[in-house]
Amino acid sequence: MSEQSIRAAASRPDQYVLTLSCPDKQGIVHAVSSYLFMTGCNIEDSQQFGDHDTGLFFMRVHFSAEAPVTVEKLRASFAAIGDSFQMDWQIHRAEERMRVVLMVSRFGHCLNDLLFRARIGALPVEIAAVVSNHTDFAELVGSYNIPFHHIPVTRDTKADAEARLLEIVRENDVELVVLARYMQVLSDDLCKQLSGRIINIHHSFLPSFKGAKPYHQAHARGVKLIGATAHYVTADLDEGPIIEQEVERVGHDVTPDQLVAIGRDVECQALARAVKWHAERRILLNGRRTVVFA
C-alpha cells in the first residue's frame, strides 16, 4: 500500500453496518435515519424490504461516523429505538473481518477456493481454523499458516467430535462455520446451538439424485442444467434457508467427468458468494427464507 493510500485510509471515517428486522409499521426508516443524524453519522448505503407475506420489515444500513465513537456506545444509544419497534438488530464495524472455521472431508475444491479468496482479500473473513475428519488437506491448510484440526468421526465418537468443534468455535471467537464439502451429518443439538451460523453447499440435484456419484446419475438421465445451492444448516437435512444458487447449462455431449468439473466450479461460486454476503452482514433470516441485500 502506498503512503498516499495509507493516509487516505487513516483519514476515512469509521464505518459501521446496522441490520434489523421487526414487525412492519410506519416510522421505522424515519426513526433510524433520525438517530443516525442526531448521533453525527452519515448514511453511505441503505437497503430495505417489507415482506407482505410475513408482515416483517428488513433493513441494512452502512453508515460512517465523523466523530470518534465506539460500537459499544452506538449499540447502547440505539437500544431504545430497537425496543420501541421490537427490532432484532445488530451494529458491527464494517471493516471488521469475520472469524470463520472451515470444515471439509475429502473433496477440497471449495476449501481451496475459500482459502485463496480470503488470502487475496476477496472475502472479508479471517479463517481461524480448518476442521476435517480426514488428513488429506493438512498440508494445503498449513501452507496458509492456518491451524488444521483433525477430528475423526465415527458413530461412537460423534458427540465428542461435535463437542471439540464447539470448543474450537468458542476458543477462537468464531462467528461462522462453513461446511466446505464436509460429508458428515450434524446433530440436531449442534444445528440449534449454531443456528444461523453454519453455511453448507450441495449440488442442486438433491433430492433427485442422492447417494454416490450424483453427477454420474444425472448424466445417465440426460440432465441439461446442473447447479449448486448454498444454505444455512438446520436439523432438516439440506432444507435450511437458501442463501444463493448457481446454475450452468450443459449439452448432450458432456461426459460425467466434465459434469463433475463444472459442478465443482458452480459449488465454489455459490458458496463463496454466500460466505461473502454473510460476512458483510447482508443476509437476514425471514422464517424458512432469507432476505439478501446483495
Image (spheres, rainbow, N blue to C red):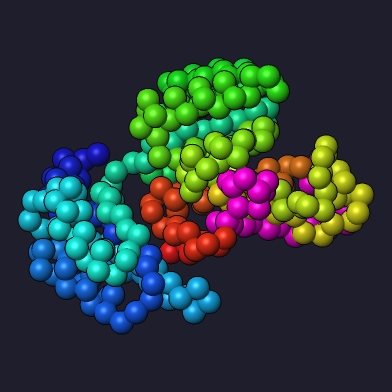
Q: Position of residue 67 (x, y in %)?
A: 7, 56
Q: Is residue 241 left or right of residue 206?
A: left
Q: Nearer the viewer, residue 127 or 37?
A: 37
Q: Residue furthest bottom?
A: 26
Q: Residue furthest left?
A: 67
Can the viewer see residue 60? no
What residue is rendered at 34% in x and 79% in y? 25
Q: Is residue 251 magenta?
A: yes
How many marks do you count on the picture? Answer: 0
Q: Is residue 136 magenta?
A: no
The stretch of residues the image draws in magenta is 233-259
What residue is rendered at 52% in x and 51% in y? 274
Vertical comparison of 286 with 275: above or below: below
Q: Position of residue 47 (x, y in %)?
A: 36, 70
Can the viewer see residue 288? yes
Quadrant for the N terminus, please. top left
Quadrant for the C terminus, please. bottom left
Q: Position of residue 200 (x, y in %)?
A: 59, 44
Vertical comparison of 72 with 19: above or below: above
Q: Nearer the viewer, residue 55 or 264?
A: 55
